[in-house]
Image (spheres, grey):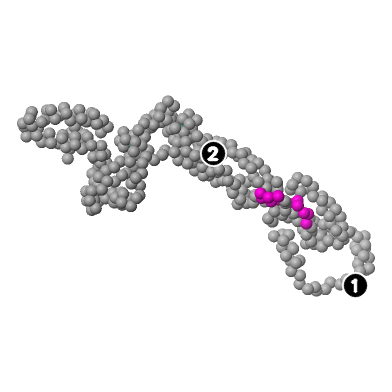
Amino acid sequence: MADHYEVLGVSREATADEIKKSYRRLARDLHPDVNPSPEAEEQFKLVTHAYEVLSDPVKRQQYDLGPQQGFDGFGGGFGDFSDIFSTFFGGHSSSGPRSRRERGQDALLLLDVELADVVFGTSREIEIDTAVLCETCAGSCCQPGTSPETCSICGGAGVITRAVRSLLGNVMTQAPCGSCQGYGTVIAHPCTSCAGRGRVRARRTVAIDVPSGVDSGTRLHLPGSGEAGQAGGANGDLYFEVRVAQHDLFARSQDDLLCTVDVSMTDAILGTEFSIDGLDGESLTIEIKPGVQSADVITIKDRGITHLRGRGRGDVKVGVHVITPTKLSGKEKELIKSFAEGRKTEQPKIAPYQQGIFSKLKGRFF
Ligand SMILES: [Zn+2]
Ligand SMILES: [Zn+2]
């Protein structure tokens, strides 16, 4: 069958007025009262039918969509079925124009911190590549001075309604308007800075407070710091997943900090006091009491990690490792021997199994 637009001699973008004018002109020439030839009569029927279709917005849209939309048989009819069903059962049948505005995506990034950073918490400035609002159009997507225009195909509804012949009889179905993608408006002059998206990719600096007590796997939530939304939509959220680096000397158990000190045999016997650098930036004084044993644990209260979102701190736990000398001078050997002479009563002997010794060792070395 001849194309209705060709029959009327108009373009597919022709306005209703142009269609009407063209039809009048053709009808004047072809009307049987004016032109009695059989060819003219046939042509007049075609022109009139074309005008009937193209002058009715609903029929014109239906015609524009092509014959597959008309449920003319079983092939390719499934799309129509879903429309029919959504019309009967709710679905999207009552949807109006949809908004161009869309919320930006959430983003999840890794944040590496040192163990010392989590003792009191820290703050960071991090550069991220993300989408930000387009400054040229401020999210309107249009070139400055222009604005979206009502879609001429759907009249701003964002949907087109068409009659579909189905097993259930004639039903009206709605589908998003293909001309405006369902927005109801078209942007004739898209902003050139953002290609009509209302947002651009950019590098942005984000300030983040890392609270004390966070551990690997803790997620920090920055609402509204994610990607800018499309067309001026709300920003997404930004999440940082914390990864706490292993420290060379200190390990962590909840909010306690664990370390080991090597103590010489004589210090273990006589006792001593010394300082090490704490992770909190201050020195830690460790008191070795006379007679300390290997695997003893010295607890220094409240010098560990500050609790997450709470007051108070964990402890520092110092595991003692007594070093037995392996090389002795002749004179040292004599002195130890004479020391041993005075303690003849102490012989090696089996002792009851003490789980504590092993668990302490395990605790020290994990
Ligand atoms: Zn723009
Ligand atoms: Zn439209």
The structure residue drawn at horizontal position 23% and vertical position 28%, both measured from the top left corner, is 18
Q: Residue furthest top?
A: 145
**Amino acid residing under circle 2:** Asp
Of the numbered discs 2 and 1, the one sitting upstream in the chain is 2
Between 124 and 349, the one lying in front of the other is: 124
The structure residue drawn at horizontal position 55% and vertical position 36%, both measured from the top left corner, is 203
Graded by Cα atoms within 10 Å as few (under 14), some (14 to 19) or many (20 or more), the crowding at tag 2 reads: few
Q: Quadrant of the N terminus?
A: top left
Does 297 lie within the magenta span?
A: no
Secondary structure, mark 2, is strand
Secondary structure, mark 1, is loop
The structure residue drawn at horizontal position 24% and vertical position 31%, both measured from the top left corner, is 16
Give the side of residue 328 with respect to residue 76, left or right.
right
- Image location (x, y in percent) of residue 336: 91, 63
Q: Which residue is mark 1?
A: 345
Which numbered marker is on residue 129? 2
The answer to whether residue 308 is seen in the rendering is: yes
The structure residue drawn at horizontal position 74% and vertical position 54%, both measured from the top left corner, is 315
Does 307 lie within the magenta span?
A: yes
Spatial separation of the CA atoms under disc 2 and disc 1: 74 Å
Give the side of residue 167 with respect to residue 295, left or right.
left
The answer to whether residue 76 is seen in the rendering is: no
Between 188 and 340, the one lying in front of the other is: 188
**Amino acid residing under circle 1:** Thr
Which mark's residue is nearer the viewer, 2 or 1? Answer: 2
